[in-house]
Image (cartoon, helix red, strand yellow):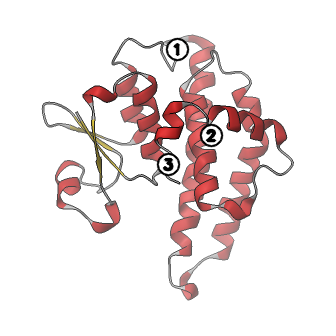
């Protein structure tokens, strides 16, 4: 398989961490691909022109990150990152959804900052920022109920916090959130996180 990714994409990083935690990297070629340059290789596989895009052995393409993670979850023999049924499954999926929404807001803020100054919406940026701050204040509640030592919820939240460090250092998300900061410091030391760190 081939994974088209950008090193700075938090969505791609989530998939890359999942692949490593599931022991799948020997069977996946990671291809650095900048979607902002509109590469023909990416457009040929994903009409949306976005990363991550996973190209299967038969040439079919799978996107976006939740779908890729779901596919990877079914491969290999590592313990599941998402329980198959029950309350635990939804605790994982809701934590992953929280992280996904926060990441969407953080990416939107970056893209808005790249627009011409006169076209930027400060109101939109403030709404996105507020959603991230609310997510940060509640994230430990979702992490505390994860049904195992390593889940997709952990990975998604970890990649979101890593992206805030990369693009939104001015947010100082650790201030007043020492428990979350301590959790991230320990989680970020995992080999899969270190190997995919864009810094």
Give coordinates of residue 51: x percent, y percent: 35, 50
Relative to residue 148, is residue 167 depicted above or below? below
Which of pointers 3 and 1 lies earlier in the amino acid sequence? 3
Q: Nearer the viewer, mark 3 or mark 1?
A: 3
Q: Nearer the viewer, mark 2 or mark 3?
A: 3
In the image, 86 versus 152, the foreground residue is 152
Q: State the residue at coordinates (71%, 30%).
A: 142
Relative to residue 125, is residue 198 drawn left or right? left
Crowding at label 1, few (<14), some or many (≥20) Cα neighbours within 10 Å? some
Q: Secondary structure at mark 3?
A: helix
Crowding at label 2, few (<14), some or many (≥20) Cα neighbours within 10 Å? many
Relative to residue 42, is residue 1 depicted above or below? above
Q: State the residue at coordinates (61%, 37%).
A: 188
Relative to residue 58, is residue 61 depicted above or below? below
In contact (CB < 8 Å): disc 2 and disc 1? no
In contact (CB < 8 Å): disc 2 and disc 3? no
Q: Secondary structure at mark 1?
A: loop
Give coordinates of residue 67: x percent, y percent: 38, 34
Q: State the residue at coordinates (56%, 42%).
A: 159
Residue lying furthest bottom in this view?
118
Q: Circle 2 sits on which residue?
A: 98
Q: State the residue at coordinates (76%, 48%).
A: 134
Disc number for residue 33: none
Which of pointers 2 and 3 lies earlier in the amino acid sequence? 3
In the image, 125 versus 9, the foreground residue is 9
In the image, 139 versus 173, the foreground residue is 173
Q: Quadrant of residue 137?
A: top right
Q: Circle 1 sits on which residue?
A: 83
Relative to residue 101, is residue 11 drawn left or right? left
Instruction: Quadrant for the N terminus, please.
Output: top left
Q: Circle 3 sits on which residue?
A: 10
Which of pointers 2 and 1 lies earlier in the amino acid sequence? 1
């Amino acid at each position: 398989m081939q994974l088209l990714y950008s090193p700075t994409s938090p969505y791609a990083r989530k998939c890359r961490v999942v692949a490593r935690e599931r022991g799948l990297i020997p069977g996946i070629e990671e291809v650095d691909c900048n979607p902002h340059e509109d590469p023909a290789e990416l457009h040929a596989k994903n009409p949306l022109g976005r990363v991550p895009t996973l190209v299967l052995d038969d040439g079919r393409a799978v996107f976006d990150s939740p779908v890729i993670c779901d596919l990877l979850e079914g491969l290999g023999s590592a313990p599941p990152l998402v329980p198959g049924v029950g309350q635990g499954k939804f605790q994982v999926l809701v934590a992953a959804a929280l992280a996904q929404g926060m990441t969407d807001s953080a990416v939107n803020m970056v893209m808005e900052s790249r627009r011409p100054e006169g076209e930027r919406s400060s109101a939109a940026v403030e709404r996105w920022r507020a959603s991230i701050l609310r997510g940060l204040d509640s994230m430990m509640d979702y992490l505390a109920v994860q049904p195992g030592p390593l889940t997709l919820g952990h990975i998604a939240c970890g990649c979101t916090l890593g992206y805030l460090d990369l693009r939104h250092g001015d947010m100082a998300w650790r201030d007043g959130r020492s428990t979350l900061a301590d959790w991230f410091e320990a989680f970020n030391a995992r080999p899969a996180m270190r190997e995919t760190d864009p810094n």
